Image (tube, coloured by chain):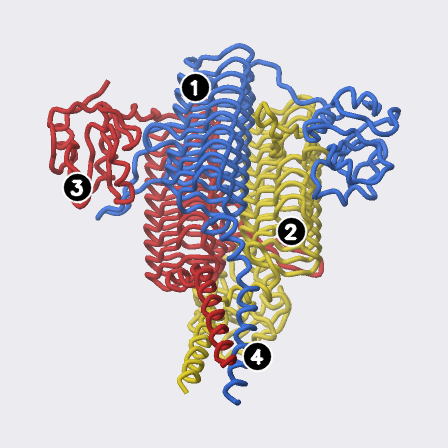
Chain colours: A yellow, B red, C blue
Amino acid sequence: MKQLTAQQIVEKVGGKLIGDPNTVINGASSLETAKQNQISFLGDKKYIDKLEGSQAGLILITAELQEEINEGYNLVVCDNVDVAFSEILLVFAPEPIRYAPGIHPSAVVDSSVSIGQNVYVGANAVIEANATIGDNTSIGASSFVGQEVQIGQANQIAPNVTIMHRCIIGHQNIIHSGVVIGADGFGFVPTPQGLVKVAQTGIVQIDNDVEIGANTTIDRARFEKTWIKSNVKIDDQVMIGHNVEIGESTVVVAQVGIAGSAKIGRGVMLAAKVGVNGHITVGDGVKVAATSNIHKSVDAGKTVLGTPAEEQRAFMYRYSLPKKVKRLTAKLDELKKELQELKNK
Amino acid sequence: MKQLTAQQIVEKVGGKLIGDPNTVINGASSLETAKQNQISFLGDKKYIDKLEGSQAGLILITAELQEEINEGYNLVVCDNVDVAFSEILLVFAPEPIRYAPGIHPSAVVDSSVSIGQNVYVGANAVIEANATIGDNTSIGASSFVGQEVQIGQANQIAPNVTIMHRCIIGHQNIIHSGVVIGADGFGFVPTPQGLVKVAQTGIVQIDNDVEIGANTTIDRARFEKTWIKSNVKIDDQVMIGHNVEIGESTVVVAQVGIAGSAKIGRGVMLAAKVGVNGHITVGDGVKVAATSNIHKSVDAGKTVLGTPAEEQRAFMYRYSLPKKVKRLTAKLDELKKELQELKNK
Amino acid sequence: MKQLTAQQIVEKVGGKLIGDPNTVINGASSLETAKQNQISFLGDKKYIDKLEGSQAGLILITAELQEEINEGYNLVVCDNVDVAFSEILLVFAPEPIRYAPGIHPSAVVDSSVSIGQNVYVGANAVIEANATIGDNTSIGASSFVGQEVQIGQANQIAPNVTIMHRCIIGHQNIIHSGVVIGADGFGFVPTPQGLVKVAQTGIVQIDNDVEIGANTTIDRARFEKTWIKSNVKIDDQVMIGHNVEIGESTVVVAQVGIAGSAKIGRGVMLAAKVGVNGHITVGDGVKVAATSNIHKSVDAGKTVLGTPAEEQRAFMYRYSLPKKVKRLTAKLDELKKELQELKNK
């Protein structure tokens, strides 16, 4: 079993050790579940009450929070608790699963496919004609890469992923199982003969350092491309319609849906289950609370919430309507009484 | 064609027969669509008006509802109408599909995999190194079982399922197609260099007698485990984040999303499309109405609804605000008039 | 590079050309991104402000909108801008991907399967015993077709689709990747021994000309069938419960959920993320706004919105409550002042 002393840990992650440098740590856990030989972390004031009663032998903490707590804990005061905890987690975690480069004999790879150096292709994967796979990329078992797809370097594509024809995947992307990239966008024209399918002739382009969660779907464009720019982080079961654009470093949490041709800026945060209507623009740095629905464009930097989404102040007014109505009712009854008394005189 | 008399049916499911014991039944359907030789059921007062005009030759009914309806129907009065109807359905249903034990020659099973007795592995399934598969478990065609996964006994795993490395599946679980167990949890730390991925070093553990609906995703833990306890029933397209815990016999309906580190108690009912914020606790026996969003912890036994969720009484007050505001407006106008009259005097 | 003159385009799509017939067009794009040699379109007044500054060399436009805009654009005035633009898109789009008929040698097709003329079965697809595949149908790579499934003619089934045993697929349907048809419906009966699974003995039937988006799930019926009628168009990540019926030409947008036994009429529009409760009826032609939840039956022809959904007028009243309450508060304060003045006299 791997173990580190508190002293070794502070040397590894940086920061200031408060407490016994010889404390032995052999695992990591949350404040509630950590045992005496485990390290834990407190990075958010919200969880400060979980400190009391924690068995953790060592706790990573911010300078700010350290000032608020009692003595008696072994602490490492550090700048970025999350980063430090992640680093320690990796020490105690089991070895990561790695796949040696090579193409599994059961994979079906068309002879026209261009394959780079150190590529892994898992069992029963299918790679169709004229696709290209860059160096150090791995394609998981049973995944499908369609005709003329271009995949760059050092991508990690999990098992059972589907990437349809002609889509373009850049470098260092992580794509989880069940993801479908490049299915047709949803478009129909009502005609006297019924709903006629609108051809979806474009592609999906994923730039670099993007992560895409399990069972997310990103539809191909009606024309040109649906475009996920670099450093975008997408959670599970997100639905991204045709011709959507998402700017750099935007975070899209689980079960969000973004309708066709919406443009999402850089550094936006769409929390879980948010809906974005089609053809609208969400400015850079916008934050949208979970389950909100954005029905019209939002200016850069705004925080919005609710369905339909509005700014915080308007939302809070709306949210507090029951209180306001109760107060109004009481005031009105009072007034009625006063008026009656006046009349009686 | 299989057929049973009403007498044979009441002997099979228990209960009291009212009507002709010789009625011949050869199928089962709903009250609206059942024909004269079909059996149907009425288990909920809500649907009592569907009885009139029903052609059903025999109807399973509760004692309570039987007292409310007219004469003239062939009835079997029984305790649990749903259970009885299910039993009869199985009589008339086509033979269930069964797979003879054996490993399809096209499956790719690593030589280090430990396989129990009477295991079925479908065509093109992939089972990686050091996985273990318990007795009587079936793994559907094209499913993926990653390295060091442990799967217990008598599980039914459908085609196109993905179970990532090191996850643990207990006994008698049913996992439907498209399910992804053990994709990375969603975690990023903002740093001056941009969003840095938080390593997801834990696993998913599914205990026993759990059912998981199509295309549901259950993410692996950042550390330790995401944990689905025994008898939990999960519908399609549910998203369960990293380090979530779900207690015994909880029911999670379609398209629910549960954010990271939330703890859901025993016997909870999360209706369709509910959202649960991260790091909160939902107590035992809590009921949450469809499409509600739970943003803070909920005490055991409560029923909550709305977005954000509140208790029924508060929700109903909020829901009836339009009526209340109309009434207030009318009262205010009345008061204004009275005041004006008083002034005029 | 393919190119057409404006004259050739108007001959192709019909309509009236306003401007230079010799303008050369070699591509198609949106108003914002089109270059001088590209055609674009304006079909909706909402986007009329995107015309200004557009570089597009030729613009498809309706007669109505043409009257509202300035001169100086090359225009084709046509009846159905969407249909015309789709036609032109196909001229400039890369050749569609086509698969030559034939069964890939890596596909696992049971010897009892009946296969029509000109059928394509992709690499590593699995087709189980007694399935039938009609003429001109293509089954994508790694897709699964279960025992006794019946698939008609000219269906396009993408890679990584799952169609479970005994389901019936008609003709000319398009089924995208990750779709799961025929997983078990979600049903459990509470008993003293815990939650007991309700057998799901029915099937899913898809009629003709249906499109089903990526990662959508359609559950099999408890008995008889879950039924998607002809010309229904379903987007990505839609969840359709057991025994649901959807009428002809209904449109179901992404992430909608329809609970068990709901009946949706013909020509209904369920916008994105709508929820429909179980056992209710949504009449023909009903329109439901995005993210609404329908908790009770809706009469034919209605437009409803909100959660729970209500008619537009009621919704707008509710939506404008903050304004109304502000006004009431001001009026009440005014009245109070007047009353005070009266008292003072």
A177 shown above or below C210 = below
User: Residue visible at 63% across and 67% down?
Assistant: A11
Which-is-in-front pick, marks 4 and 2? 2
Disc 4 marks which residue? Answer: A67
Tag 2–tag 1 contact (CB < 8 Å): no
- The reply to whether residue A306 is visible in this rendering is yes
Same subunit: marks 4 and 3: no
Tell me the distance, in whole angstroms, between the alpha carbons under discs 4 and 3: 69 Å
Same subunit: marks 4 and 2: yes
Sequence-earlier tag: 4 or 2: 4
Disc 3 marks which residue? Answer: B66
Describe the element under mark 4 as helix, strand or loop: loop
Give residue C150's mark.
Answer: 1
Disc 2 marks which residue? Answer: A296
Tag 3–tag 2 contact (CB < 8 Å): no
The residue lying toward the viewer, choosing from A162 and B83, is: B83
Q: Would residue B308 be found to the left or right of residue C8 on screen?
A: left
Question: What is the chain identity of the residue bearing mark 2?
Answer: A
- Amino acid carrying mark 1 in the image: Gln
**For residue C185, what is the image quadrant?**
top left
- Amino acid carrying mark 4 in the image: Glu
Q: Would residue C286 be found to the left or right of residue C89 on screen?
A: left
Question: What is the chain identity of the residue bearing mark 1?
Answer: C
Describe the element under mark 2 as helix, strand or loop: loop
Describe the element under mark 3 as helix, strand or loop: helix
